[in-house]
Image: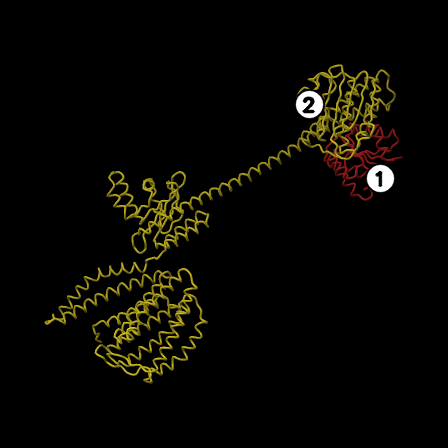
Amino acid sequence: MKKILIIEDEKLLAEMYKDRFSQEGFEVFLAFDSEEGLELAKKEKPDLIMLDILLPKENGITFLTWLRETPEISSLPVVAFSNYDDPETKKRALELGVKDYLIKTNYTPKEIVEKIKNYLL
Amino acid sequence: MVFYLDSKILILISAAVSFILSWIIFRRSQKNKVNISFALFTFFLGLWAFCFYFYFYPIILSRLMWIKLVYFISLLILPPALYFISCFPIRRMESLFLIGVFYTTLVFPLIWLLFFTDLWVREVIIYPLGPQTVTGVGYIFYFLFVGIIAVFGFYNLIKNYLLTRGVLKTQLKFILLGIFSFAIPTIIVDIVLPLISGNSRYFWLSPVFAIFFISATTYSITRYRLMDIRVVIGKGVVYFLSFILIVIFGLLLLFLNSRLNQPVPVNITASFILIIGILLFQPIFRFFEKFASKYFYYTFYSYQTVLTDLGKKLTQVLESEKLSSLIANTLIDTMKLDRAVILLRNSDGSYEIQKNIGFREENGISLVKDNFLTIWLEKTQKPLIYEELFLIIRDTTEEIEKERLKKLGENMKRIEAALCLPLFIEEKIVGMIVLGNKISGEPYSVQDIELLTTLSNQASIALQNAKSYSEVKGFSQKLEKEVEKATKELREAYEELKKLDKAKSEFISIASHQLRTPLTAVKGYLSMILEGSYGKIPEKTQRPMENVYQSNERLIKLVNDILNVTRIETGGLEMKFEKSSLEEVINTVVEELKGTADQKGIFLKFEKPKEPLPKILIDKDKIRQVILNVIDNAIRYTNKGGVTIKCKMQNAKCKIEVSDTGEGMTKEELSKLFESFSRGVAGTRLYTEGVGLGLYIARKLIEMHDGKIWAESQGPGKGSVFYIELPLKL
């Protein structure tokens, strides 16, 4: 069973994506901020991390730097998904090696699952 | 001691003058070797003349001894003279070495010859006309010895004269002049006259001629160097000459008295002479003072030299302060003035002191306190001389003017100003040079006034140039500062704007994020409901649910559009150009929208060109967005028929054509189609579903590709065609 870590501070959305990914047979872990996300990532070593960018305290970009500096999990695939559509942030995220930067509103959960499946192939 | 009273007294006077000068020079600077040597030289010269006198009137010792002393002293004169020549004006001791050796080797044999043999001076024979010295063969050695040293001295002096420049040259000129005025008459009375007429009775005059030499040399040394020495010497000479003249006068009276048959008793004549002497001393002293001041302070300036020199210098200086200093100093130095002030006139008519030498600060400018002097000078157009002022006053008929002139004269006298030299530019006064008196007390000569007038013309031009220069310089400096300030302000404003822009764009990003979050939740849950993730939904609910979903999609699109428009308008939209195939882009869009067209029951076809189009530089995502938008619109407003897409090369451009069989548009609608809603009322009637931001964004994006987008329609109901033209950038 593939493990997905979703770092998303908006509980409503987190639950929704968890539902959808669970339906598709993923094991889903939820984290609500960067620190928690990093802890979970270290602990669970998920197959893929879905990362929101605007997070309380430290944002997604900071999470990405932490992740890349933590040896055992530094190469985990990350897909950024956020409604924060800022070119600078997007550029920075891509530099830090995210597979994609998805704008949440533009995709249904189903479409997102499809995309993630593609990245896990 | 009895002094015989005849013309030989001149020898004594010469000796006395020599001693006095020697003493003064020695007193002035006991440390300066040049001066000491000169003092020594003068002293020996005096001693020499002194011995000469005793040769004629041997009160003690014999005539023979005196003439031997004369020759002996003439030998002593040589070392200081040579030393002086070697050191003045340039120290060149090495040339002294040889002649020094020459001198020291031969001087002692000569002295021996002189005092212990009769080979040189044999005897003195008394003729009725005076004593005559008979010389022996040794005299030739003396003659050669002195001759060689004299030639050496002359040679060095002339060489120095040719090598030096300026003031020193003038000094050397006087030394040479002194030597000639000493040597030539001496040669005449000592050699030429005896040779021609066998008459050597004027031979005694040679020590008298020494006075010329001493005076000229002294004058030349002290002339430029040590003003105070000059004053001391001047005074000394004046007192001495006055005294001597009175003594001579008194002796003359005594002599005349003694010749009378019945001489007046000496005590009466003596008191008479004393009274006359006391009475005469003052006028005689004044006469000599005037005479001396003329020759001790008189400045030989060459008109042309001063003018060309100053003119040359004036062109080399651009700062008005330096220029004023230059002018004032040149005037003071060449004309020997006690004070000078240069005033420049401001544009408001007031004056300011540019350079002041010698005047008291408030006095320097006091003459121009009121306007009268300025007006007067502009009227007369020539310098105002204090000494002429009373003549002017006398000739002035107008009472007020007379009063003003008198007041001006008093003022000039008070501040000791002697001359007002106006500086004109086109007959307007731009400044003034006020000069004090000459140190000599002489009045300004005609030549002086001419020189000053010419000089003032040059000076006024130069000063005016300097003023303009400093103004231009000041102006450019000010301008520079202004530009700097403005640049700084602009930079700050720009930074501020950039901050604002960033803030704005950040605000939009955040705001859109906040709007999108609930929209995402609605979209997500609705889609999952419609997919049946939460169980199959009743058929009746299906359609309303889909409507809700569509409405939500519109909202999402609106938010996206607003974000895009903001990006475009704040310049925050970054383009990522890459070589892409337009056909491929169109293909994917057509594939994506096929379903929508099918649902509406209309056709959607892409007529590919026969030859594939070249790949061009585009931002693929943005072009895709534009094409999607245009085709999506076409499908949306076409209810029967369908949408055809073509794409071809035309005029070295890629042209995409999207034609539909839909509702078409009026001309007015066409004209506003690609405008932002912030600018007008784009598409409000027909585009019920959107706000038309899509096409505005499309236009902007295409423009960012240097392309063009436009639409044509034959009118309502007749369908429309959208064109996109992109340059062929490879």
Looking at the picture, which amino acid does disc 2 mark? Glu
Asked whether residue B718 is in view, the answer is: yes
Q: Position of residue B299 (x, y in %)?
A: 34, 57
Which mark, residue B718?
Answer: none
Q: Position of residue A78 (x, y in %)?
A: 81, 37
Protein chain holding label 1: A
**Where is mark 2, residue-wise?**
B675
Q: Nearer the viewer, residue B471 or B148?
A: B148
Q: Is residue B288 above or below residue B705?
A: below
Q: Nearer the viewer, residue B708 or B33?
A: B708
- The colour one sees for chain A in the rendered image is red
Q: Nearer the viewer, residue B581 or B596?
A: B581
Image quarter (top left, top right, bottom left or bottom right) of the C terminus of chain A:
top right
Protein chain holding label 2: B
Q: Is residue B515 above or below residue B352?
A: above
Looking at the picture, which amino acid does disc 1 mark? Lys
**Where is mark 1, residue-wise?**
A45
Q: Is residue B438 above or below residue B634?
A: below
Q: Are marks 1 and 2 in contact (CB under 8 Å)?
A: no
Q: Position of residue B418 (x, y in %)?
A: 31, 49
- The colour one sees for chain B in the rendered image is yellow
Q: Looking at this rendering, what residue extends furthest in the top direction?
A: B717
Q: Is residue B267 left or right of residue B556?
A: left
Please tell me whether mark 2 sits on a helix, a strand or a loop.
loop
Asked whether residue A31 is in view, the answer is: no
Snapshot colouring:
by chain
Q: Position of residue B366 (x, y in %)?
A: 34, 44
Q: CA distance from mark 1 to mark 2?
A: 51 Å
* Camera-side mark, 1 or 2: 2
